[in-house]
């Protein structure tokens, strides 16, 4: 799923290129995109409606630091925020949620085949909106 706005290729409709009005915000220096968080699976560290600064991870297939928070874009167009840790084998990652304590059973770790992933972005910064 690729949208084209102002000759800029945008990999997902929820990703806003940093040049579209956020470039003067120091929280987002060095970021490629911003997005607004939704859902509750990462609620203990990222609140709904937080604005996140992201930068794309080059060559994530070869190496990615485990335990960081990433935005994962699948080839089918799903965009999710998760921690990534070692998968069941070299062809998989385990995606880990960080929900509130009462919701941990709702969001168990999930395996994802690396072949289903289109892009991975590091969540570099958050800016809470009230």
Image (tube, grey):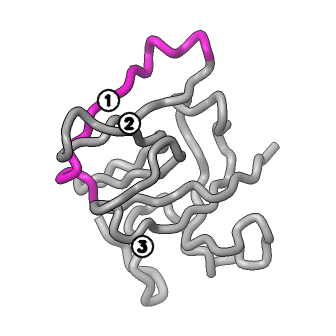
Q: Where is residue 68 shown, x and y percent of the image? A: 53, 46
- Mark drawn on residue 10: 3
Q: Where is residue 55 shown, x and y percent of the image? A: 53, 67
Is 84 drawn above or below residue 53 in the view shown?
above
- Hey, which residue is sitting farthest bottom in the picture? 7
Is 106 drawn above or below residue 57 in the view shown?
above
Location of mark 1 (residue):
110
Is 61 drawn above or below residue 10 in the view shown?
above
Work out which quarter of the rendered image holds the C terminus and state it: top right
Q: Residues within 10 Å of mark 2 (few under 14, many from 20)?
A: many
Q: Report if the CB atoms under discs 1 and 2 are less than 8 Å apart.
A: yes
Q: Nearer the viewer, residue 52 or 62?
A: 62
- Residue under the image location 76 percent in, 47 percent down: 128
Location of mark 2 (residue):
95
- Residue under the image location 35 percent in, 62 percent down: 60
Q: Where is residue 13 shown, x and y percent of the image? A: 43, 62
Q: Is residue 120 left or right of residue 16?
A: left
Sequence order check, earlier mark of 3 and 2: 3
Q: Nearer the viewer, mark 1 or mark 3?
A: 1
Tell whether position 114 is magenta: yes
Q: Which residues are magenta?
A: 101-118
- Mark drawn on residue 84: none
Sequence order check, earlier mark of 1 and 2: 2
Report how far apart the C-alphas of labels 1 and 3 lie in the structure.
Answer: 27 Å
Tell whether position 46 is magenta: no
SS state under label 2: strand
Q: Where is residue 53 shown, x and y percent of the image? A: 63, 61
Is 98 drawn above or below residue 112 in the view shown?
above
Report how far apart the C-alphas of labels 1 and 2 lie in the structure.
Answer: 5 Å
């Amino acid at each position: 799923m690729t949208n084209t706005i102002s000759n800029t290729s945008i990999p997902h409709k929820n990703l806003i290129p940093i040049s579209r009005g956020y470039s003067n915000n120091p929280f987002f220096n060095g970021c490629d995109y911003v997005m607004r968080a939704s859902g509750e699976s990462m609620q203990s560290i990222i609140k709904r409606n937080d604005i996140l600064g992201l930068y794309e991870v080059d060559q994530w297939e070869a190496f990615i630091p485990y335990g960081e928070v990433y935005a994962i874009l699948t080839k089918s167009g799903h965009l999710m925020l998760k921690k990534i840790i070692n998968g069941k084998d070299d062809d998989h990652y385990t995606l880990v949620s960080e929900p509130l304590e009462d919701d941990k059973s709702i969001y168990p770790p999930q395996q994802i085949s690396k072949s289903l992933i289109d892009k991975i972005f590091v969540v570099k910064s958050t800016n809470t909106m009230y």
